[in-house]
């Protein structure tokens, strides 16, 4: 009906003694409250100025455009929210999202320190809002101690795994070497804890080591004077480029016939900006860690975004299995019978599916071929860090099967079929809405 026709009808009705416009608004509001949200939401939350985050979210959206999941008869849609890339922003956004009437699940916040700031709000909801983390690696990514249940699925291995794998690879290159461990100055909430974990791994192998918990506090000519065989850097790309440039400058101006140390960088340095502005020549030969054995820089989507959607879809499919089998709370069955939808009911069913997957250690095989298996606390059981190297203008995976931890080679060669079928979608261009919380 046209707007003008609707206005005429309402005017005629008012003249006949019918309820006024205000009454209709109240009736509409009651109807909206009764029915509940028309769709549940998966919130993709992170800094939309970061290219890595944007590619992850694009990947998730690309899959969603090919398959829209449902819980019962309610579709599951996507909202993208910018947390501005700060812990304060993440805390504020998570408080808003956790109190919406449609939040089914969160994928975010991609940066470890931001996700740590946001988790108490999600987990403190009743029922908790489940969270899927992608690139976050911090060992401090834990639920509040008072939480009875922690529905957080961590797709990446942790910094504990990163320290183990990086040091193991470095020791293979220099079994009796002397090490320098350096924490970058950018994002010290990430760099210093990781540097401490690296130092612990080196110490446990009884190797000589110096630990520098700030790049800017390293004394002049320390790298030449220290005669290090390996320098392990916990830092972002800008930290890495500055530090490598300093090392080369020290050795260039050294009168001694010294050999430059091998430099190893942490996962936060794994970014194309490392190679920009002559970085490829500067960083040539440097080794980096990365959570995946592939890097689809030439693709518009990040593998973690594609895989996160596959994982979310599998869990929603498990939740729907519970609906079909009647294994749901009586309150859900009652409200559904009178056409009333509440996201708390849907979250409760999804939480049951997540709890089941944790307890049974179910394996999820994504469309990209990555196998995900979680322990009872949602930590990745079978994750590891791959070793990559800068070769000219490219990043190349260099560690291969020979560097897999004991037992993992056999585990990866005997992958079982996934518990749930996960859709593998071809690449295509999705729309990418950019929303700010409160808009």
Image: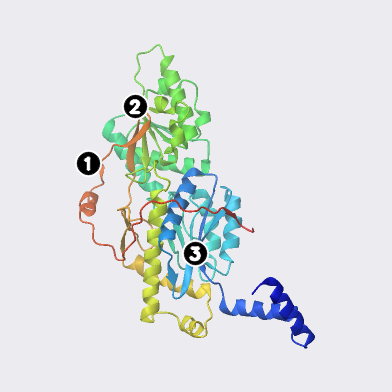
- Tell me the residue at 44%/42% (across/down): 194
Quadrant of the image containing the C terminus: bottom right
Q: Quadrant of residue 150?
A: bottom left
Q: CA distance from mark 3 to mark 2?
A: 52 Å
Q: Residues within 10 Å of mark 2 (few under 14, many from 20)?
A: many
Q: In the depicted view, which residue is nearer to us: 141 or 411?
A: 411
Q: Is residue 381 above or below residue 17?
A: above
- Tell me, for residue 402, which label it has, or none: 1
Q: Is residue 35 above or below residue 419?
A: below
Q: Is residue 32 left or right of residue 22?
A: left
Q: In the depicted view, which residue is nearer to us: 220 or 351?
A: 351
Q: Quadrant of residue 361?
A: bottom left
- Dot 2 falls on a residue whose secondary structure is loop
- Tell me, for residue 77, which label it has, or none: 3
Q: Residues within 10 Å of mark 1 (few under 14, many from 20)?
A: few
Mark 2 lies on residue: 229
């Amino acid at each position: 009906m046209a707007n003008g026709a609707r206005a005429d009808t309402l005017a005629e009705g008012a003249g006949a003694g019918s309820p006024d416009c205000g009454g209709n608004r109240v009736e509409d509001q009651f109807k909206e409250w009764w029915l509940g949200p028309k769709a549940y939401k998966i919130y993709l939350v992170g800094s939309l100025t970061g290219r890595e985050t944007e590619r992850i979210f694009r990947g998730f959206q690309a899959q969603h455009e090919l398959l829209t999941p449902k819980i019962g008869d309610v579709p599951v849609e996507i909202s993208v929210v910018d947390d501005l890339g700060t812990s304060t922003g993440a805390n504020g956004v998570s408080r808003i999202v956790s109190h919406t009437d449609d939040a089914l699940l969160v994928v975010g916040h991609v940066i470890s320190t931001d996700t740590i700031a946001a988790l108490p709000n999600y987990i403190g909801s009743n029922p908790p809002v489940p969270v899927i983390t992608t690139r976050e690696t911090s060992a401090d990514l834990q639920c509040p101690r008072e939480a009875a249940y922690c529905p957080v699925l961590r797709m990446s291995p942790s910094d504990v795994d990163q320290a183990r794998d990086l040091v193991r690879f470095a020791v293979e290159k220099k079994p009796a070497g002397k090490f320098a461990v350096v924490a970058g100055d950018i994002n010290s909430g990430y760099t210093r804890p990781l540097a401490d974990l690296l130092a612990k791994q080196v110490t446990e192998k009884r190797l000589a080591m110096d630990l520098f918990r700030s790049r800017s506090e390293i004394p002049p000519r320390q790298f030449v004077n220290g005669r290090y065989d390996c320098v392990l850097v916990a830092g972002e790309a800008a930290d890495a480029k500055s530090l490598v440039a300093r090392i080369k400058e020290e050795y260039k101006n050294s009168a001694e016939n010294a050999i430059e140390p091998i430099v190893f960088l942490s996962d936060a340095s794994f970014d194309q900006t490392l190679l920009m502005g002559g970085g490829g020549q500067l960083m040539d030969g440097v080794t980096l860690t990365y959570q995946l054995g592939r890097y689809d820089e030439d693709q518009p989507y990040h593998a973690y975004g594609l895989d996160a959607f596959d994982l979310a879809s599998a869990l929603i499919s498990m939740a729907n299995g519970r609906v079909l089998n009647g294994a749901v709370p009586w309150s859900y069955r009652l409200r559904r019978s009178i056409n009333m939808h509440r996201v708390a009911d849907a979250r409760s069913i999804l939480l049951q599916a997540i709890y089941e997957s944790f307890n049974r250690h179910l394996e999820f095989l994504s469309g990209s071929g990555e196998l995900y298996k979680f322990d009872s606390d949602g930590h990745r059981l079978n994750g590891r860090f791959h070793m990559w190297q800068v070769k000219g203008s490219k990043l190349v995976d260099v560690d291969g099967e020979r560097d897999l931890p004991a037992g993992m080679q056999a585990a990866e060669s005997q992958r079982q079929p996934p518990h749930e079928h996960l859709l593998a979608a071809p690449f295509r261009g999705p729309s990418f809405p950019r929303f700010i919380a409160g808009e």
